Amino acid sequence: MTDLEDFKTRLKIAKSKLDKNNLKKTSERSIFLGNAFKLGTELVAAVVVGTIIGFILDSWFDTKPILILIFFLFGAIAGIVNVIKAAKRMQKK
Amino acid sequence: MATNPMHQFHVYRIGPEINVVGVDLSFTNASLFMLISAILILILLLFSTKEKKLIPSKIQLISEMLYNFIAKMISDTAGKKAKPYFPFIFSLFIFILFCNMVGMLPYSFTVTSHIIVTLTFAIFIFIGVNILGFVIHGFKYLKIFVPSGVPVILLPMITIIEIISYLSRPLSLSVRLFANMMAGHTMLKVFGGFVISLGLIGGWLPLGFSVALTGLEILIAFLQAYVFAILTCIYLNDALNLHH
């Protein structure tokens, strides 16, 4: 038991020495970096998916250039929506 | 041949060709490095949890920190309901982390720098989350495509946009990991090639860059595994707690 008590006091001393602010800042910084990586691909992926859907629908209905154009635009909008959603999620934190 | 920066991504067969009903299932260098990562994970976790002490040893501390890190991430992003999915998220995170880190060793192969690997992860997650959503909420799960408080005239357009945005999830998830790993490793190789071609006089600057980039790549290797896991948590959260 004395071993545990001893450990407890040592832990307390070590914890008081830790610079909490600095520690928090570094972990926060890496989370921000992760978020930055997230946003770029969110935007692009939706455009790609929209265009692919347009392409498939075009070859189904034989309306070659029309649907691909429309769905490209939808994809671009969806990409922006994605980014706004992600940004909102970040702000909540 | 070795100076080609793309040569490191070459997949080749190791051992005999295995052909099952027209599908090539041969053991490749990619399979080898996945196996190495899995074995390393097993060794680390088995070794670190062999002696369970109240005051942890250094190696036990590593696995406890990993556990706490993932547990906190899940409870922060997906809430209490996501607790049963801890093993899945943990395995996903640690496997991607180890694949990325093993790829940082010289002469090794980065499994996650191939889109087929990351896309398989992402599609697996996507299908799993969808099944989960439909099992828990039934057809009400389709409500995520219809945001509340939208005028009826705009509803068809908004629904299409929401569907595209939903379908883009697996793509963005997989492309992010794959592109980061591939770009980083290509860049490392290109700078390594500069060191050789500029020789003893001019080679010091790219060598310095290489060292700095290696540090950055290790950070990215960790960060991408983290982002992959946290986005899985977010998608899980959408399926578990419907709040649109």
Image (cartoon, coloured by chain):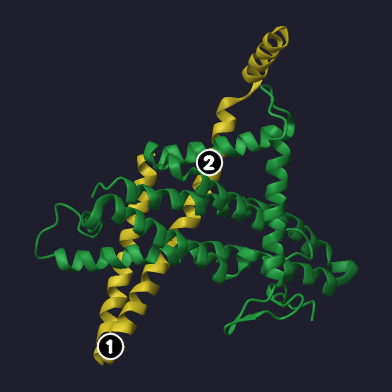
Chain colours: A yellow, B green
The reply to whether the C-beta atoms of the residues labelled 1 and 2 are less than 8 Å apart is no
The residue that appears at 32% across and 71% down in the rendered structure is A75
Query: Looking at the image, which residue sits at the far left?
Result: B152
Query: Looking at the image, which residue sits at the far top?
Result: A2
Report x, y in % for residue B69.
55, 38
Q: Give above or below for B99 relative to B30.
A: above
Q: Is residue A37 left or right of residue B191?
A: left
The residue that appears at 69% across and 48% down in the rendered structure is B42
Question: In 3D space, how far apart are the residues under numbered discs 1 and 2 (Cα atoms)?
Answer: 45 Å
Query: Looking at the image, which residue sits at the far front?
Result: B21
The residue that appears at 64% across and 50% down in the rendered structure is B219
Residue B221, by quadrant, is: bottom right
Report x, y in % for residue A67.
26, 83
Report x, y in % for residue B220.
61, 54
Evaluate whether residue B213 shows in this view.
Answer: no
Name the residue carrying label 1: A60
**Local crowd size for mark 1, using a 10 Å CA cut-off: few (<14), some (14–19), many (≥20):** few
Which amino acid is tagged 2?
A: Ile
The residue that appears at 78% across and 67% down in the rendered structure is B192
Which amino acid is tagged 1?
A: Trp
Label of residue B70 in the image? 2
Q: Secondary structure at mark 1?
A: helix
Report x, y in % for residue B8.
72, 72
Q: Secondary structure at mark 2?
A: helix
Q: Is residue B237 left or right of residue B41?
A: left
- Give the chain of mark 2: B
